[in-house]
Amino acid sequence: MKILVFEYITGGGFNRQALPDSLAGEGSLMLNALLDNLVRFNNLDITVMLDERLNDSVGKTGINTVIIGPEHDTNEEFARLVQQCDLVWPIAPEFDGILQNLCQRVESSGKILLTSPAIAVAIAGNKFRTYELLNRHHIAVVPTRMFDDDYCLGEWMVKPVDGVGCADSHVISSRQDFDRMAARKGEYIIQPHLHGATTSLSCLFKQGRGWLVCVNLQRFELTNRQYRLTDIVINHHPDPGRYQRLVDQIAQALPELWGYAGIDLIETADQTWVLEINPRLTSSFVGIHDALGINVAEAVWQLLHGEPILNPTCNNAINVQTYAN
């Protein structure tokens, strides 16, 4: 079977503008980790789109690369290649509807999408809609509202409603902070600035069911009132069982989730709070095979026909260095 892999940042999404080092670094990590999983399959013909500036970033044999330069229309190239393949695995940011539109295009083509469908991305890719959904299902989620310039005492996190990672997220507390944020363009949410362990869950989902793959620890630095993800310890928690109930609750609240997704948490002294749901591959995916010996791409393939088989062959904590936002 033929599969198209399209990681948006490295695959031509920025082909007519400067390529941000941090996004390109994260994208390359996820792309190569996914290709490492896929090349272990037999009889899988892999095609990957690649920005011409990153032509040497995929060093694996047996992979068809389609080079995207500034003269190409990336969306048209993606649509053309989708028609030539049986399976499509997009990796893209949620902002500006990028991931949702890619998923919708694959679904409209009748090809097999190996990620959550557009309807799930429309909810999970919007932090306020995610809050509303989880709150309705009585899942502990960080209190969230749309940002306005109504000043409130305390310390707050403000971030784009469809943002990715720490990009354009700010800790604010003063009247002046509120005024500066109000002057910015775009839609933002505001949440209380909670302190606790920053955990992420790597999961698989299908039709209202969820499987926890591993629990990861995210480490951040706070500089100039902005957080930066520095590294992730994959498979950090030795006993992930207590998180499975939360995964089950989220699966039932958003049964459209399918395939791999990441759940970001903050664990305070008295509560485990959901921060957001990422309906796509995340940076934590990069270390799962080394940590557990699990081929996540194979497990996703198994979801097409039944339940995933998650049999770890090792149990290591793996540190993954990330790129500055």
Image (tube, grey):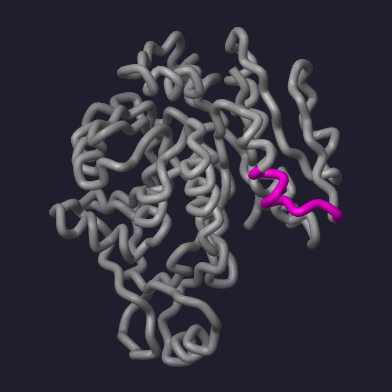
Residue 78 x %, y %: 67, 44
Q: Quadrant of the C terminus?
A: bottom right
Q: Main secondary structure of the magenta part?
A: helix
Residue 34 x %, y %: 59, 28
Q: Is residue 299 left or right of residue 24?
A: left
Q: Quadrant of the N terminus?
A: top right
- The residue located at (31%, 58%) in the rendering is 130
In this view of the protein, which residue sits in the foreground, 150 or 90? 90
**159, above or below 28, in the image:** below
The answer, for residue 233, to whether it is visible in the render is no
**117, above or below 325, in the image:** above
Is residue 123 highlighted in magenta?
Answer: no
- The residue located at (58%, 66%) in the rendering is 223
The answer, for residue 72, to whether it is visible in the render is yes
Is residue 72 highlighted in magenta?
Answer: yes
Residue 262 image-quadrant placement? top left
In the rendered structure, which segment of residues is drawn in magenta? 71-79
- The residue located at (31%, 18%) in the rendering is 307
**287, above or below 145, in the image:** above
**245, above or below 92, in the image:** above
Residue 116 x %, y %: 41, 40
In this view of the protein, which residue sits in the foreground, 320 or 245? 245
In this view of the protein, which residue sits in the foreground, 76 or 246? 76
Q: Is residue 46 left or right of residue 238?
A: right
